[in-house]
Image: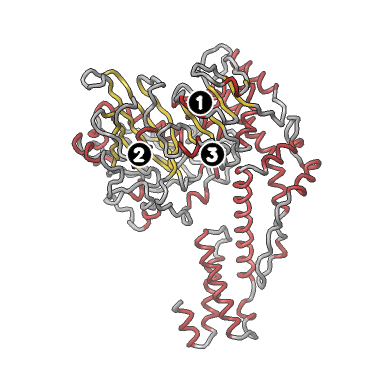
Amino acid sequence: MRDAGVSVCVAVPRVVHRGSPSPSLFCICTGSCDGGPEEDQRRSQSFEPVVMNPFDGSASPRREETDGGDSRCPWSRFSSWLECVCVVTFDLEIGIVSVKTSICYLSFPDSYSGCLGDTQFSFRLRQSVGRRALKFRDDVYNQDAPVTLQREVSHFFGYVYFRQVKDVSVKRGYFQKSLVLVSRLPYTHLFHSLLQIIAPEFFEKLEPCLEAGDDFWEKTDFPGCVLEAGLIFQVRIPSKTDKPGGSPVKQNLLPAPTLLPTIHELDLFKCFQSVLIHLQMLWELVLLGEPVVVMAPSPTISSETVLALVSSINPLKFCCDFRPYFTIHDSEFREYTTRTQAPPNVVLGVTNPFFIKTFQSWPHIIRMGEIRMAGDLPKQVKVKKLSKLKTLDTKPGIYTAYKTFLHKDKILIKRLLKGIQRKRPSEVQSAILRRHLLELTQSFIIPLERYMASLMPLQRSVTPWKTPPQIRPFSQDEFMSTLDHTGPQLTSVLKGDWMGLYRKFFRSPNFDGWYRQRHKEMTQKLESLHLEVICDADLLSWTKDKSEVEIVDLILKLREKLIKARRQQLQVKDGVLDKLDTFINSIIRSLPEDLQTVLNTH
């Protein structure tokens, strides 16, 4: 499968969802491919048609505000959901073009997987160096979304539907094609569900089936769109204000919708069923951002396992790199396989046995077998020494010398194993697992959140005539001293070396990412409080005995704060920004005309 080229066609959208993702109920549709086989072959020579330019960040989701909802300019609305739709075809004649190599190879299982029929999986791709990153300062979606569901800035997700069936009409004897949705949104379940609808029909009818519904889309009267078959996807996007692990908010449903219970959650039990007794170890490895390689028999198992690992520390954001499906053709291959330095903080999912030799120096390797959802108890893999990972037929297992800080939760393991014996549905098993991991992460993170909140200056110290007070620096020793009274033992029954786990966590990218995010939120809160107390002050009276220089300085500082508040979309009380704007204009009008002219022109 790798000895010849694959070609790619980028789909140009004609019909799109009206509106960008927001924490509310929504319906979604996809775009369509233009042109026939000759057009496909022409496009395969370049992955960046000018009409879309999807991978250079030139299409901002906010452009829909300037096009007035004009259906003739659908790309700005379409790009709120997807960067593009790719059709990747295995081709014996057309070679690989360097710009699109990564997308092409990541869209096909390698020859060792032997994926006959239909296969779905995911990948994650770094944005090309030198490309312009999207500007998210005005992205309302990221303001309201949980950190684990925010739009990626420097990476793309690829959601793949691959078909390989025998076909004697082609030279190689097989029909091999992938339909790929490329997005910055981590909506794994949603986009794979969408592919299950559109991909099979696309493989049968090719481009015409995606073009046929153009007129129908334009006649849609309600918010959202309907697929060609009259199918509606309806699902609620979680908000930052939602309680983690809480029940979905009930919504008024549109007629006859296809309801999706989640946009991103995986079947955790299916992913972890062979490593249940090592769940505590895997959680710690992910929490600490340790370098982990998942070796799997197929890209489906590889990608689902990696995504399940990354999600195991929700609601804490995984701040390291992760690649659900990684190949030797990836542009980061050399970077991640060099032996001249320590392995990077990344979780990689691979299927090629070549990686067994390549990653022998990595500290943690998970060798997965085929996933079988039978009624029998799944065989639990063993923890083995890395030195035993040598041959291509290495048995499934966790190859590591890692010693956990916390003890196993034997009650959880017994409950899950008993659930298998009683044929408890996988959805219920997954819910039990998800609840356990959520409570474990919350027990770990709540003491950190509580201590971080104590670093915030008192609200009464925020005054209108002084710069907002600084947040106190984070002291690891001071935090550790609080654990005896406010530590994880208050909410978790797990015993072990919690303090040792915290010390190692402080050296991880996940702590750095968490701290930066919390510090940013607290700084913005201080700025919001400062704006509110300024608006409550009598600014005009303050200026009466001040010099013109002091008044102009005040005006310039207030304008800067106003611009910054609007740019960062600070959460302030209703009317505060308008009131501040009025204050500024009132102060300007109190000045001599020559100064008014200068200030009004800047």
Q: Give left or right: position of 291 versus 594.
A: right
Q: Amino acid type of disc 2?
A: Cys
For image coordinates 40% across by 54% down, the residue present is: 62
Q: Nearer the viewer, residue 459 or 382?
A: 382
Label 1 to label 2, Cα distance in Å? Answer: 43 Å
Q: Quadrant of residue 278?
A: top right
User: Of 4 and 134, which appears nearest the observer?
Assistant: 4
The amino acid marked with disc number 3 is: Val
The earlier-in-sequence mark between 2 and 3 is 2
First in sequence: mark 1 or mark 2?
A: 2
Q: Which element type, helix, strand or loop, lies under badge 3?
A: loop
Q: Which of marks 1 and 3 is nearer the N terminus?
A: 3
> Which mark is in front, 2 or 3?
2
Q: Which residue lies furthest to the front in this view?
A: 340
Q: For residue 382, which numbered disc appears in the image?
A: none
The location of residue 531, given as percent across then percent down, is: 60, 66
| Residue to which mark 1 is pinned | 357
Residue 34: image location, x then y, percent: 23, 40
Q: Given the image, on which type of amino acid does mark 1 rest?
A: Lys
Asked which quadrant contains residue 405, the reply is: top right
Give the percent coordinates (x, y) of residue 164. 32, 22
Residue of label 2 = 29
Question: In the rendered view, does 526 fall on the left or right side of 10?
Answer: right
Is label 1 in a helix, a strand or a loop? helix
Q: How crowded is mark 2: few (under 14 residues within 10 Å), some or many (20 or more)?
A: many
In the image, residue 37 above or below residue 24: above
Determine contact: label 1, label 2, CB under 8 Å. Answer: no
In the image: residue 214, left or right of residue 191:
left
Residue 577 at least partly seen: yes
Give the image quarter of residue 119: top left
Residue occupied by mark 3? 249
